Image: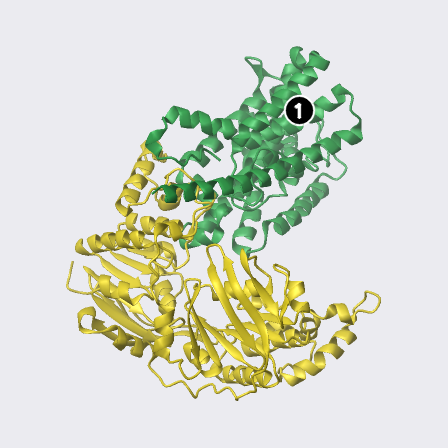
Chain colours: A yellow, B green
């Protein structure tokens, strides 16, 4: 092997439509080392990984493997070039056995090109031994916990015998013992001269395992240091890196009575003992990492998902569990994270979308006319300054910002007292972001209670009167506006919970 | 659905595991129902099984549906469906007759080859539209169902092929037996064995299951999804083409109604045989037993004296029961798997 690094990315850029996911990503990984890649949610880490994996094609920049320029058009090409990737979310075939999942597409062949099942099971057994887990290689992948699935992913990547191994948050679901095992395997792979990239939000893991750390922020490369020569504080400040407090000012509003009261909400395997309140005129920010359980909490409060224990009260009155209709009647509005999938009928007109929730009140003798829809939608769309030439316009053709406004208009038409909004500005260009923020601020000023989930730290810090930080399904910090600094939020969001094997949800 | 034992592999002997897996398998339960139907009907009328015609018909009648069900299964496993097989069958059956009319003296093997090739081409059209056009297979093949039937109607008009148009050497295939087993059934079994073997032991076969189990994951794995889906449709079309030739040999008369509605029987046979309609699981063995059950029940009910209306209702009930049972069992299986994994962790 030559002196050139195993993997080099320089000034790599990638946009999806109008949204820039990666401005200028750079990374150089030496063979025989473990390289940490850290950054806030949305910093562009996963996009970078997907470019290396051949899922996305870069728009610009240098991409080299072992000193040679490469350009992967598919995951098969990157695999063939010796790149193995463990994705953040496991991608398994539920109907097939665990072993088949590991070896799919490259099963050991015996005589006559038939699959040598015995060899396959033995090999899978060795892999599991090495990782120190007891999973029957013959059982189907269906029914495995996220942690188990993650282990299958790891086994798959190891068995690829790759020269570059990328792990995108492999430890998020693992217990302490399993993490130790994984690290032992990672170190032995490093000692064999392979290059490893390790993405994690847990700084203690980064400092324990890695040799070098690269920081990314807002889709750009920030710095690369030897782990021995840096500190957690230094890295956190680089990840956050800017003064944000005044970027999204929320106008002070009169904080009124408690509107939403959540007590002891628990759902096996997703969140535990969650209690909080939201008052009228107040914006409460729910901060935390992707996968911490924030959206799940919101969905449970609104009644989309079930919960095992706890209660939800609106203005002191209990809201029935698992009944979105009851939640709407109690005055809750919910703008989900994925507008296209969950909040907006993109193939329908603006008016129809806005009127969808209040349709019941609009019908005459069971019939609903376009005129009625337009009449009901008009005032709301106007108030939110939805820029559509006519209410008949198709929602799919609008910009992200306007789509968000249509979803908001749809819910505001129900005259809610509490608005739950998940990632209000995801996929929205910078100019419109400020508009959405101003809108939320205005609504709070009119006495609406708002629970806002956001992965963008500046947004949370700028908008929220109070910040609740969620980490691994628990609220780990409650910070007032003055207390909430980027550093404190990040520390609470990455607070490593050392859980034992029994605690790991199945 | 093979075995799903959760203990350490070394703790159970391979034979015991194989037997356990077999006993729990869907194929066995469908086969048991088939045996039950045959036994009950034979008790009512011994000729159903014990006359020479009875035995032959028992094996011969399902041979057509067997071919279609095997092809359909391969497509369904990839989370697709091919509704055009009935029309393909009709078209190739007519082609078979036409070949004998236009080219007297054409060897029988050449006719078989032509049927396979014609079916494969029709399957290729389906496959290309599904794999590259990104349109759901249900819509595409519903369209080609009508198009292929339309081509057939235009070509044949009111014309029909009669037994006199075809050489006796070919028609004899429809009745000939080897060791009391009809030749057409043997063709079906050979195809069944070949496809079953491929699906179980070849990489390509396993990849079909993977694609149906989670198409997105299959792309991330770098599997050749399009090529595999395309090949599944080509195979399904080719087998429908072969079924068309078999149809001609068995019935001798081919009118424009040939193969009408057969596609739904093929889907029904696969579903009854335990092939999951959403892909990823099931075997051609199950589908074959399903085809036998479907055809045999249709023949048995009149013997037992059940009216025409109830005959159809029974078939419908069978399909619904198969799907409902599937849901119930897979939900229970999933709970069992979760529980077993939980236990193992706690024991650790």
Residue B271 locus on image (x, y percent):
60, 37
Residue that lies at the very extreme toward the right in this rendered image: A365
Residue B323 locus on image (x, y percent):
62, 39
Residue A204 locus on image (x, y percent):
27, 65
Res. B181 image quadrant: top right
At mark 1, the secondary structure is helix
Q: Residue at x 18, y 53 (%)?
A: A192
Residue A399 appears in view: no
Report crowding for label 1: few under 14, some 14 to 19, many 20 or more residues within 10 A (C-alpha).
many
Say whether residue A304 is left or right of residue A117.
right
Work out whether B74 lies above or below A160.
Answer: above
Residue sitting nearer the eye, B88 or B220? B220
Which quadrant of the rendered structure holds the C terminus of chain B? top left
Q: Residue at x 27, y 76 (%)?
A: A233
Residue sitting nearer the eye, B88 or A316? A316
Residue sitting nearer the eye, A216 or B89? A216
Residue sitting nearer the eye, A76 or B1? B1
Q: Which residue is mark 1?
A: B296
Q: Chain of mark 1?
A: B
Residue A111 locus on image (x, y percent):
32, 31
Say whether residue A12 is left or right of residue A404.
left
Give the tally of numbered discs.
Answer: 1
Res. A371 image quadrant: bottom right
Res. A214 image quadrant: bottom left
Work out whether A176 lies above or below A421.
Answer: above
Work out whether A167 lies above or below A135.
Answer: below
């Amino acid at each position: 092997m030559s002196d050139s690094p195993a993997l080099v990315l320089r000034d790599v850029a990638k946009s999806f439509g109008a949204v820039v996911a990666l401005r200028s990503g750079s990374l150089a990984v030496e063979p025989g080392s473990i390289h940490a890649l850290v950054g806030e949610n949305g910093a562009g880490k996963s996009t970078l990984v997907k470019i290396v994996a051949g899922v996305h094609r870069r728009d610009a920049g240098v991409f080299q493997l072992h000193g040679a320029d490469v350009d992967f058009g598919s995951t098969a090409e990157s695999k063939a070039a010796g790149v193995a990737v463990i994705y953040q979310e496991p991608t398994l075939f539920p109907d097939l056995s665990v072993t088949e999942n590991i070896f799919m597409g490259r099963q050991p062949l015996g005589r006559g090109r038939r699959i040598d099942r015995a060899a396959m099971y033995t090999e899978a057994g060795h892999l599991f031994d090495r990782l120190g887990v007891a999973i029957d290689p013959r059982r189907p992948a269906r029914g495995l916990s996220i942690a188990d699935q993650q282990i299958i992913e790891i086994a798959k990547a190891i068995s690829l015998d790759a020269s570059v191994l990328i792990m995108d948050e492999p430890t998020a679901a693992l217990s302490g013992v399993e993490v130790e095992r994984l690290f032992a395997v990672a170190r032995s792979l490093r000692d064999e001269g392979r290059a490893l990239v390790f993405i994690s939000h847990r700084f203690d893991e980064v400092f324990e395992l890695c040799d070098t750390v690269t920081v990314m922020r807002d889709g750009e490369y920030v710095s690369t240091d030897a782990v021995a020569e840096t500190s957690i504080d230094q890295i956190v400040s680089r990840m956050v890196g800017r003064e944000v407090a005044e970027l999204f000012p929320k106008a002070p509003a009169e904080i009124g009575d408690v509107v939403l009261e959540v007590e002891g909400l628990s759902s096996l395997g997703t969140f535990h003992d969650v209690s909080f309140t939201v008052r009228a005129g107040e914006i409460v920010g729910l901060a935390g990492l992707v996968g911490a359980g924030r959206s799940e909490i919101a969905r449970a409060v609104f009644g989309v998902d079930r919960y095992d224990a706890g209660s939800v009260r609106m203005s002191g009155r209990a809201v029935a569990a698992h009944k979105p209709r009851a939640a709407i009647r109690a005055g809750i509005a919910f703008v989900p994270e994925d507008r296209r999938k969950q909040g907006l009928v993109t193939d329908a007109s603006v008016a129809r979308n806005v009127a969808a929730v209040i349709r019941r009140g609009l019908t005459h003798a069971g019939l609903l006319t376009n005129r009625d829809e337009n009449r009901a939608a008009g005032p709301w769309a106007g108030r939110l300054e939805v820029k559509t030439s006519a209410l008949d316009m198709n929602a799919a053709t609008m910009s992200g910002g306007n789509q968000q406004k249509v979803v908001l208009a749809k819910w505001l038409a129900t005259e809610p007292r509490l608005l739950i909004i998940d990632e209000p500005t995801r996929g929205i260009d910078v100019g419109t972001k400020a508009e959405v923020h101003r809108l939320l601020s205005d609504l709070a000023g009119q006495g609406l209670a708002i629970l806002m989930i956001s992965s963008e730290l500046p947004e949370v810090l700028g908008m929220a009167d109070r910040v609740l930080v969620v980490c691994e399904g628990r609220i780990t910090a409650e910070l007032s506006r003055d207390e909430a600094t980027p550093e404190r939020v990040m520390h609470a969001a990455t607070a490593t919970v050392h859980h034992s094997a029994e605690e790991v949800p199945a | 659905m093979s075995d799903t034992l959760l203990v350490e592999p070394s703790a159970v002997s391979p034979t015991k595991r194989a037997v356990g897996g077999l006993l729990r398998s869907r194929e066995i339960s469908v086969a048991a129902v088939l045996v039950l139907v045959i036994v009950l009907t034979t008790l009512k009328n011994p000729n159903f099984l014990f006359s020479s015609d009875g035995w032959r018909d028992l094996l011969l009648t399902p041979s057509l549906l067997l071919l279609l069900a095997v092809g359909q299964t391969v497509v369904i496993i990839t989370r697709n469906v091919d509704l055009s097989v009935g029309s393909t069958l009709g078209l190739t059956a007519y082609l078979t007759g036409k070949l004998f009319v236009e080219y007297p003296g054409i060897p029988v093997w050449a006719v078989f080859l032509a049927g396979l090739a014609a079916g494969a081409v029709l399957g290729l059209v389906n496959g290309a539209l599904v794999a590259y056009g990104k349109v759901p297979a249900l819509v595409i093949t519903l369209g080609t169902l009508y198009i292929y039937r339309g081509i057939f109607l235009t070509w044949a008009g009111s014309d029909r092929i009669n037994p006199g148009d075809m050489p006796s050497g070919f028609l004899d295939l429809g009745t000939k037996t080897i060791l009391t087993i009809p030749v057409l059934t043997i063709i079906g079994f050979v195809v069944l064995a070949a496809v079953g073997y491929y699906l179980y032991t070849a990489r390509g076969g396993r990849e079909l299951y993977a694609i149906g189990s989670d198409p997105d994951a299959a792309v991330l794995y770098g599997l050749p999804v399009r090529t595999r889906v395309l090949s599944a449709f080509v195979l399904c079309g080719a087998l429908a083409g072969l079924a068309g030739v078999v149809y001609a040999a068995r019935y001798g008369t081919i009118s424009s109604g040939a193969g009408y509605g057969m596609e739904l029987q093929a889907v029904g046979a696969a579903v009854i045989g335990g092939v999951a309609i959403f892909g990823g699981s099931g075997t051609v063995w199950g589908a074959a037993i399903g085809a036998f059950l479907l055809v045999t029940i249709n023949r048995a009910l009149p013997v037992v004296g059940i009216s025409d209306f109830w005959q159809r209702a029974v078939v419908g009930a069978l399909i619904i029961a198969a799907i409902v049972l599937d849901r119930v069992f897979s939900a229970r299986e999933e709970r069992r798997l979760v529980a077993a994994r939980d236990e193992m962790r706690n024991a650790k």
